[in-house]
Amino acid sequence: MKTKTFYVVQYNDCYGNGDNKRLEVIVESHDDFKEWLKQRNEEREEFSECEESEEEFNLISLNLFK
């Protein structure tokens, strides 16, 4: 049986009280996460929102069995 690891990106609300934790997206690698975060921050700029950093997210590994 083959396995492939994906990562669930969770916003961890590290600067809040933890009530706003939420799942954001599933990515295939840490590099994909960084690319997703870059795109997310570019979209946030359009709305004059602050950039988010990697520390505001947890990557939860998820194994897919084939």
Image (spheres, rainbow, N blue to C red):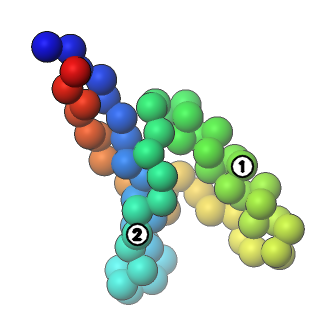
Q: Badge 1, how many Cα within 10 Å: few under 14, some, many 20+? A: few
**Measuring 14% from the left and 13% from the top, which residue is drawn there?**
1
| Element on which disc 2 rests | strand
Image coords of residue 38 (percent x, y): 69, 47
Q: Which residue is under mark 1?
A: 39
Image coords of residue 56 (percent x, y): 49, 62
Horizontal side of 13 relative to 31 (left or right) equals left
Q: CA distance from mark 1 to mark 2?
A: 18 Å
Q: Quadrant of residue 44?
A: bottom right
Give, as a three-letter code, the residue at label 2: Arg
Image coords of residue 57 (percent x, y): 45, 57
- Please tell me whether residue 32 is drawn above or below residue 14 in the rendered image: above
- Answer yes or no: is residue 9 visible: yes
- Circles 1 and 2, Cβ within 8 Å, touching? The answer is no
**Measuring 46% from the left and 30% from the top, which residue is drawn there?**
29
**Measuring 35% from the left and 80% from the top, which residue is drawn there?**
18
Q: Badge 2, how many Cα within 10 Å: few under 14, some, many 20+? A: few
Q: Which residue is under mark 2?
A: 22
- Please tell me whether residue 6 is drawn above or below residue 17 in the rendered image: above
Q: Which is more toward the observer, 59 or 54? A: 59
| Element on which disc 1 rests | helix
